[in-house]
Amino acid sequence: MSTATTTPTSNVTKRLGAIGKARELGILLALVIVVIAATAANPNFLFSADGWRDLLLTPSILVLVAVGQAIVLITRNVDLSVGSVLGLTAYLTGRLFIDFPGIPIIVVFVIAVAFGGALGLINGALVAFAKVPAMVITLGTLYAYRGINVLWTGSDRVNASDLPKSFLALGTEQFLTIPILTIIALVVLVIAGWYMKNTRGGREFYAIGSDPAAAELYGLRVTRRLLTAFVLSGALAGLGGVLYAARYGTINSQAGSGWELDAVGAAVIGGVAIVGGVGSVWGAAIGAVLLLTINRALPILGIPDFWQRAVVGVLIIGAIVLDRVLAVRQKRKLIEARDDS
Amino acid sequence: MSSITETTPAPASVRRYRDYDQPLWKRVLLTREMAIIALLVVVVIIATMTIRGFGQPITLTYLILDVTPILLIALPMTLIMITGEIDLSVASVVGLSSVVTGVLINGGVPFEIAAVVALLVGGIGGAINGFLVTVVGLPSLAVTIGTLALFRGLAVGLLGTTAVTDFPEFWTDLAKAKLGATSIPLAIIPFLVLLAIFAVLLHFTPFGRGIYAIGLSKETAAFSGVDVGRTKFILFVLAGLVSALAGIYYTLRFGSARGDNATGMELQVIAAVVLGGVSVFGGRGALHGVIAGVLLIGVLASALRLANVTSDVINIITGALLVISVVSSSLLAWLRTQRQTPAVKPSAESGAAG
Amino acid sequence: MTIPPGAPDRAPALELRDIRKSFGAVVALRSGTIEVHAGSIHALVGENGAGKSTLVKIIAGLYRRDAGEFRLESADVDFTSTADSKAAGIAVIYQEPTLFPDLSVTENVFMGRQPTGRFGRIDRNAMRTEVDGLFQRLGVRIDPDRPADGLSIADQQVIEIAKAISLDAKVLIMDEPTAALSGVEVDRLFQIARSLRDEGRAIIFISHRFDEVFDLCDTVTVMRDGAYISTSRIVDTSVDEIVRQMVGRDVTELFPKQETTIGGPLLEVEGLTSAGVFHDISLTVRSGEIVGLAGLVGAGRSEVARAIFGVDHYQSGTVHLNGKPVPAKSPTAAMRLGLALVPEDRRKQGLVLDSSVARNTTLAIREQLAKFGIITSGFENRAARVWASRLEVKTNALSTVAGTLSGGNQQKVVLGKWLATEPTVLIIDEPTRGIDVGTKAEVHRLLSELAGQGMGILMISSELPEVLGMADRVLVMREGRITAEIDRSDATSENVMFAATHAEEQHS
């Protein structure tokens, strides 16, 4: 032992602290490798105006949804309804522009985000008050929200011609070569990341997911935090819905279906533990980017894009196995460190 | 020994133990399962009376043809969920087995062999899930989200966007054939056989007793000689096998092997199982409730289609039923605890110190 | 109600009178009374099931009382949540600390009330500085940045104490804090407790160890069967007096030990080792013999039992039953050979709480009950009825859910479940923890009878009188090793306790 100081940070914990960050760096590294490989095969993947734009633009909406999903997962819950919320708000966005011509874009944004938040609140309230597992509740609302969407839309759909040009421009325009959508996603990501790391509320999400029983015993406001997490997830899916409308222009009743599994997959790949308490929104966001970038890179690398879902599956399984191995090693090291001292 | 009789509250007479504290009719009728069965009967009666064409035999034929894959997969899913686990990859296994059958047929392999290989592939898929859950120790929700993507990806990757439609007529006809002169499809037979097997396995074997014990208390089960890992592994393999069987049926029924066959069916199966009274926490549920749950959703869909309501409304009903059924059961539980411990207010009426 | 002696002029920091609490039909607390003064350490003693934990949970705001008075510094209070009690300056350190494993030590100390700056940003530096100060004061060297996962129980308790101090708690409740601590760790804890008392805080100390109570505390309150019995100053009372009040009768009457003829060895364990848990455990249980396994909580006794039975893994060593090797990691195989384990935690390991008495009783013999692989409720009820009547389980129907039975009856169901397997050796871990006095005597009589019939019994117990009263031979474990083997005639509380706490000198 070295000279006793008041801050006996041992080597072990320094290394362990690094693991968390390394987990996100690792996934970032994988992303860089994919980008480099694809660019080597076809320089246009990165070094063309379109390539650069697509690289940033494609994952932006999923990043938003994955950030919300990560917050819910960190509290040891899951939100399977995000795809349906996204689809429903996307259609709502279209209807607002059709039914209220000349409505300011900002108002549409506010309404859609609030609407998504309200749908999330329904999830959260059912989970927090009825004490039913989030998986069941959000599986139910996945169907219910999608059903409402179908009932409302019917065989109708919103076309790009129904939407104002200035709104559609949001989906394609760039600022300093960075697409507006990406900027929005980044701003949300930075705020969410800061909130989760630096505020009481953020830390309590981690505490609740780490040990829900202890959180109750502590007198943490568990109900309120759960509601917040689901509202955030719903609101971010709602924001995703508006951006989906801006980016794709056409919205039918199936918009966003299946996104729930992509969002959970992205978070898990990014190191968010499905049992709660571990991970970060940054990881989830990088996971989302990796997921969608691989999709685009596969054909360039000579692999038919039919295989992309298989690659995603391998990624998810690889990520959770890796996390498990790391966790077992960390536990062993911590116990060794205890026995040494 | 006199000191002992002092401390023991004298067991005056030999105690008599009844088997049950409630009469038979209460135990059978006042259950979650019976509520779903009753709801199913009510829906069938109302639909028969109000919707034209619902009472016709052809409705029954198509209803059974449509729900058979879900009925099949619901069997092993029920057992898995009673242990407290979940398998989201079942629909992807359906797709994969469909594609494997199709690809082999394309390559000139006889259908019978192709089907056996497809079953084998399903079993291996289930074994991968089981291995990751029981040996590596990962949560089944995460594992099967991964294999959901992986198996579907393999299915789509193998066939791309093409479809194989060239199946032996004998088998495709058999999948749609009816039982003698009735309107009941032949496909009901393999289902009934599997239902009998799974019902006995779950409700009348030591293995089934172990399944419930695992779901209610994994630790007690392990201390009582239930091999938790082995039990779960077997169930995941069974889920893979039965899903593959459902995939083969699906292929024959529609005469088409495609990578995206049965996409999203996992959620339909789980919704039906939960609706049928199986707790997501594990330990609770019975097969008759699950069958009623599957049929309820199937009947509603079929009735609405006949009533010319857009068939997708079934989504709202499925979702709403699911939420209402779980919320109502936790509401009932809450009411029961309220009744048990009448809220006696503390005598000292005062505000909390702050 | 007697007024506690020596009540100073100041109002008590904490005062509860005639508190009642029942759960369904079960009355957990009939009249809980305690009065604690600032600047003193107050012991709360009583047997398991006496109502101490229920009282503590009411103080902590986890339960709401049904009736009774509850005052803090003369002001009536009524907590509806743990947050309320925390805000009122009460901190509880539970037997098993409740930390968030994934979060750092520092975060654990401040969770829910971190110092914040602009925009609600947590001031990590301030947090860190305060933790450093706290740890320095407590004289501990725990890395504040490491996760709480993997900390020893002693360290976790220190973190709970740090939390209580940083909360500036006026009342500190320690629920059996020393149960899992070694001698050095107990000394450190006592030092901390005394300095907190000298700062004017009120401390409630719950313990089963009278030497500690008499060493540390100023006053003592005794509870029995959910009711207040007495409060006295430590200097005015004696261990015998307190034990008499706790038990309510002469202790020696409890143990109906039959003299048995001890036969040949049944269970033979050789050099069993599991790294970091227990080392080189060798023991023998003979026919007709009750072997007591004593030691502190955390000494590794339950772990040894679980390894022998095959629930837990071990690295080396052998287990033989009737001369046949018992394979590792297979409870099923151990059961077939004639081994049974009544585990430590009845509610988590012994019973399926939500399942019926019949299902529970037959869970371990479900394979034997089946005919042609088929088992029905009829078979189960028939087998369960035999054991329910033999052990006099108090319930009307076999379909009763096990979780609704009293602790004593639950233990009978677990015993029935294992006796149904017709074992030749029964390992029983804490046979009477948390069960009422009457059932306790029944369990002891049963164990004695079983030994009389030639069964070998390995009994793990943390209650010294039970070990001394029941065992033919006492093995003592300390920190994963067997430190003493003492014959019934030589065993005293002193030499058993000594072997359980001092590793260096081996006694026999």
Image (tube, rainbow, N blue to C red):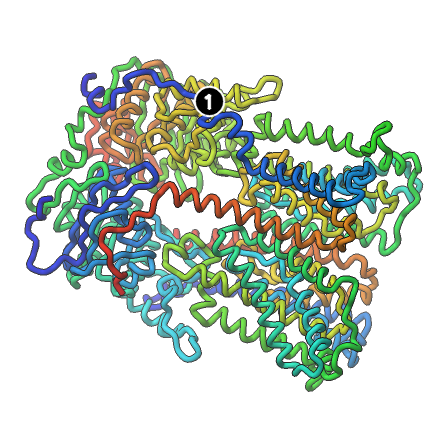
Q: Is residue A109 left or right of residue A298?
A: left
Question: Residue A236 or B291: which is nearer the viewer?
Answer: B291
Quarter of the image for the N terminus of chain C: give it. Answer: top left
Q: Residue at x 55, y 47 (%)?
A: B326
What residue is pinned by disc 1? B19
Height in image: C401 above or below A239?
A: above
Height in image: A79 above or below A198?
A: above
Q: Quadrant of residue B87?
A: top right
Q: Position of residue A119 (x, y in %)?
A: 58, 63
Q: Is residue B264 left or right of residue B105?
A: left
Q: Residue at x 48, y 51 (%)?
A: A332
Q: Position of residue B17 (x, y in %)?
A: 41, 20
Does residue C178 appear anywhere in the picture? no
Q: Quadrant of residue A39?
A: bottom right
User: Disc 1 residue type?
Assistant: Asp
Q: Quadrant of residue C246?
A: top left
